């Protein structure tokens, strides 16, 4: 088993634990439907590569059915009172940010020292951050799992959007959407112009991500249609730099679209904002600045 397989296995078992905790939560008004949703999702993550394709497909249909019929809800998570949480916040102060900082620093150091995938490093760093948070807060792993379940229930069905949209991007690519886009772009953008091709690729990643709601879905289509044939093959761009900055351009689109519900709409609900699109409006200007920076960096570094 490689690192990616282990990461999916750990994630799947954690989500299955959420399902078990939900099933035992007698105060949960929709405990059966919510528990079934997370159990199916957890099993598909942990064992999907070994299950027959038809079983995984039926599992995805079951998830969609449970979500569409309103079977997900909120339960009792044994949270501290607001007063107790404020007291703890004042006691710990800025140390509360330590677990959050462990994740990016740990991911970087793990990838740097082992040479393995950054995704594996992210998984290792997240587990380490979980342990650091338990030590810092002097809590048990069960409390951490309950908090994880609370966040999973708060996000709800939107938690599975990245996987669904990534699969949709692959289907689009297999259907030849990338080649169609390449033809459309070639008819409008002069392929002899490096600057025009880079702008088309980065802006295309952002716009398609806005439409799809997920940078992974856009990456398969736009990179196969514009990034590889025009930027890498035709103009000799460095594939690693082009790919990284192209994906980051897609993330710029994520900041500007309600389709990225788990990033933009769910947080607005969690923060109880009156304007559900307030987060998107606040992110538009930084996203456009980042997109311009990505274009500039690609022109400077990839050729």
Image (cartoon, rainbow, N blue to C red):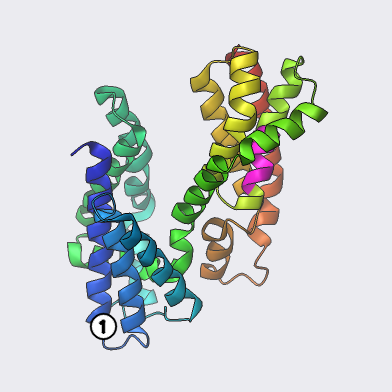
Which residue is located at x 24 percent, y 48 percent? 127
**SS assignment at label 1:** loop
How many numbered marks are there?
Answer: 1
- Image x and y of residue 303, in percent: 61, 11
- Image x and y of residue 270, in percent: 51, 68
- Image x and y of residue 191, in percent: 75, 19
Tell me the quarter of the picture where residue 20 sits.
bottom left
**Residue 286 at least partly seen:** no
Which residue is located at x 18 percent, y 39 percent? 1
**Residue 1 at least partly seen:** yes
Which residue is located at x 68 percent, y 24 percent? 198
Determine whether 168 is above or below 261 in the image: above
- What segment carries the magenta color? 202-209
> Which one is in front, 38 or 190?
190
- Image x and y of residue 271, in percent: 54, 67
> Which one is in front, 274 or 178?
178
Q: In the drawing, does residue 68 fall left or right of residue 63? A: right
Which residue is located at x 60 percent, y 48 percent? 254
Tell me the quarter of the picture where residue 47 sits.
bottom left
Q: Badge 1 is on which residue?
A: 25
> Which one is in front, 137 or 90?
137
Q: In the drawing, does residue 250 fall left or right of residue 82? A: right
């Amino acid at each position: 088993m490689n690192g990616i397989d282990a990461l999916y296995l750990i994630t799947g078992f954690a989500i299955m634990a959420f399902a078990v905790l939900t099933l035992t939560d007698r105060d949960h008004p929709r405990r059966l439907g919510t528990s079934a949703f997370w159990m199916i999702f957890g099993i598909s993550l942990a064992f999907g590569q070994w299950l027959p394709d038809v079983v995984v497909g039926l599992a995805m249909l079951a998830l969609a059915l449970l979500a569409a019929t309103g079977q997900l809800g909120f339960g009792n998570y044994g949270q501290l009172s607001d007063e107790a949480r404020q007291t703890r916040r004042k006691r710990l102060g800025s140390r509360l940010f330590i677990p959050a900082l462990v994740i990016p620093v740990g991911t970087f150091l793990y990838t740097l020292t082992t040479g393995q995938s950054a995704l594996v490093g992210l998984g290792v760093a997240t587990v380490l951050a979980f342990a650091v948070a338990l030590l810092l807060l002097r809590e048990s792993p069960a409390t951490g799992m309950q908090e994880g379940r609370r966040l999973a229930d708060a996000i709800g069905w939107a938690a599975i959007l990245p996987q669904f949209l990534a699969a949709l991007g692959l289907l689009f690519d297999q259907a030849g959407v990338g080649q169609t886009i390449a033809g459309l772009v070639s008819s409008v953008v002069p392929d002899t112009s490096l600057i025009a091709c880079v702008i088309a690729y980065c802006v295309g990643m952002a716009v398609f991500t806005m439409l799809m709601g997920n940078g992974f879905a856009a990456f398969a289509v736009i990179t196969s249609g514009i990034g590889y044939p025009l930027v890498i093959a035709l103009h000799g761009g460095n594939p690693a730099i082009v790919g990284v900055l192209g994906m980051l351009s897609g993330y710029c689109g994520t900041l500007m679209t309600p389709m990225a519900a788990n990033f933009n709409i769910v947080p607005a609900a969690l923060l109880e904002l009156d304007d559900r699109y307030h987060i998107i409006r606040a992110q538009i200007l930084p996203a456009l600045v980042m997109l311009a920076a990505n274009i500039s960096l690609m022109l400077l570094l990839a050729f």
